[in-house]
Amino acid sequence: MISLFKTADGKKEILDLYNQKLKDLNIEFKNSIIDTSYGETNIIIAGKSENPPIILVHGSNGCAPVALETYSNLNKSFRVYAIDVLAQPNKSAETRLSMKDESYGKWMVEIITALKLDNLTMAGFSFGGLVILKTLEFDESKIKEVYLSAPAYIVNGNPLKVLFKIFIPMKRFMKTKKLKYLEKFLNEVFTDRDEFAFKYLSKVFLHFNMDFTPLPVINTKKASLIKTPITLFAGKKDILFPGNKMIKRSKKIFPSLKSITLFEDSKHVQNKKQNELIESIILKK
């Protein structure tokens, strides 16, 4: 299989940043590799084994250490399992799954089964929300509750806005390597500047073959069958998955929708204060 990393040197640069981020978290953790039918999945586990389990699922072009940093206090009350999603710039297998079928749900249920988890909480950001919703569609029997932050798979933004404000600056950076285009991309996507994202994505955009497949949205009938309580966080200024549009559709299609928070000043990626609020809501559950 041809690697999604364009060069061995590029892969090393990306994984060096991954390892540095994990080290900077300064937490006790262990690594686990789960062999699934889609390939090996790397998981970072933190928190006491007797604590209730929570699975964290990062967004597109991300990695498990970023998810751990985003909600950095969860490991004090939960046994945290931060998953490296397949075919992303991280340490899991490079098998690219289809977003149109049940592959992501089947993959995640294999992980849950292998880890012997039950009465499980899940929290995911952006593409991680799609993975979680696909899991609920496939088999929600082991899942107690989910928290979705600016999730994919519910609505999509205006394609022209996404093209001109996000996709074109990304492509221009990839072609020219001029940092002004990366800055433009980050400014549209991140509520506040994130130095690690700047370093990491500058390598990912140049050295990793990203998936540009159009994102699907969940079928109304499938959404209506989900029984697991869903807590939703959306950003009003999110170009990718607009908050007001997301909330409107979510209220119509999810009978298990428990709570909604709209961040008035949030773009796609929440800032530290917003993530702390999300974390506090998870911890209060």
Image (cartoon, helix red, strand yellow):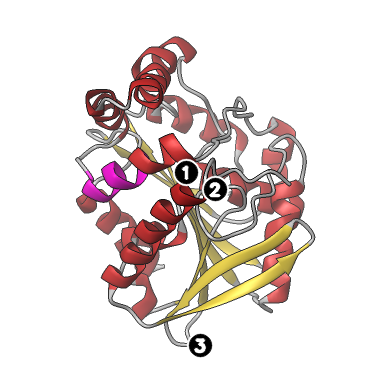
The amino acid on which the numbered mark 3 sits, given as a three-letter code, is: Ser
Secondary element type, mark 2: loop
Q: Nearer the viewer, residue 158 or 183?
A: 183
Question: Horizontal placement of 269 versus 210: left or right?
Answer: left
Instruction: Using the numbered discs, state the Cα–Cα distance from disc 2 to disc 3 in whole angstroms.
Output: 27 Å
Instruction: Tell me: residue 136, above or below residue 69.
Output: above
Q: Is residue 31 above or below residue 242?
A: below
Pointers 1 and 2 in contact (C-beta within 8 Å):
yes
Q: Is residue 209 left or right of residue 59?
A: right
Q: Amino acid type of disc 1?
A: Asn
Q: Nearer the viewer, mark 2 or mark 3?
A: 2
Q: Which residue is mark 3?
A: 49
Q: Residue 111 occupies which quadrant of the picture?
A: bottom right
Whether 188 is drawn above or below 276: the answer is above
Closest to the camera, between mark 1 and mark 3, is 1
Find residue 270 and report its image quarter: top left
Query: Quick check: 195 left or right of 122?
Result: left
Q: Which residue is mark 2?
A: 88
- Badge 3 density bin: few <14, some 14–19, many ≥20, Cα 10 Å: few
Disc 1 target residue: 61
Residue 267 image offset from top left, x and y in percent: 30, 33
